[in-house]
Image (spheres, rainbow, N blue to C red):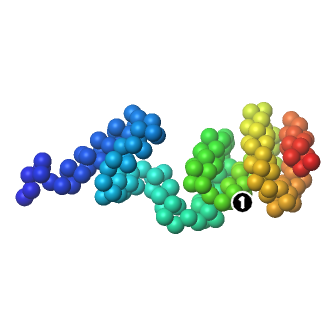
Amino acid sequence: MVPLAENPLVYNFTFINRIIQHAKAMGKAKLRQKLESLPKENIVRVVMSLYDASKEARQYLDFYAEPNSKDECERFKQVIRKEFFPSRGFSERPSFATCRKAISDFKKMKPQPYNLADLMLFYIENGCEYTMTYGDMWEQYYTTLENNFNKAMEYITKNGLLPVFQVRIEQMLNATDCGWGFSDTLWDIFREYKS
């Protein structure tokens, strides 16, 4: 049996753990410098350990190795849909933080602009469908959706995707007619970017 101190797996794990702990305390520039000073095989070990240590890192690295924006978009759509319409029961207060995190996590993967715009719009569509299904909501609910619709419209316009999404947006807006001036505000945001 190999003594614990000489076991290469223990050494590698300890070495990699030390790098990860050190990385938490340093900025990107120092991390880059540290990684650039390591031999290639140690960098591979660090990346593989990161892959094993974090679900988010695993998803990012899987996407990096085999980018498929459409499949990843569908996966994040399921997260958003589940917040508004869980497979069992009723979602009394959908978590906007969970929806924003889904969009943020997808954005970090550097997907195709079309797919990110699709996900951003899907979030708003589900919020609108939820309020049309269950009735009037609290003011912050509407304000949050309005702000996120504005972000979606800004992104869609900035990436020249309005012609691609215009009919879908208009269908969503036409299907949303509820209180607190929510529908009017969404229409105003749309018109602002359309012109």
Residue drawn at x 30%, y 47% is: 16
Front residue of this view, candidates 73 and 41:
41
Residue 40 in percent (x, y) is at 33, 57
Location of residue 154 with respect to 170 vertically, above or below: above
Horizontal side, residue 82 vs residue 13: left or right: right
Up-down relation of residue 140 to residue 176 (above or below):
above
Q: Of residues 148 and 17, which is closer to you in this image?
A: 17
Crowding around mark 1 (Cα neighbors within 10 Å: few <14, some 14 to 19, many 20+) is some
**Which residue lies at the image location 41% right of the left edge and 35% below the top edge?**
26
Residue in view at x 48 percent, y 51 percent: 56
Residue type at mark 1: give it. Answer: Tyr
Query: Toward which corner of the image does residue 77 lie, by quadrant?
Result: bottom right
**Residue under numbered circle 1:** 114
Viewer-closest of 155 and 95: 155
**Residue at the (87%, 51%) spot, across then down:** 173
Q: Please identify the quarter of the rendering in which residue 67 is found.
A: bottom right
Tag count: 1
Q: Position of residue 35 (x, y in %)?
A: 37, 47
Q: Residue 44: x and y, percent? A: 35, 57
Q: Is residue 81 left or right of residue 191?
A: left
Q: Is residue 87 visible?
A: no
In what quadrant of the picture does the N terminus appear?
bottom left
Query: What element does badge 1 sit on?
Result: helix
Q: Is residue 47 visible?
A: yes
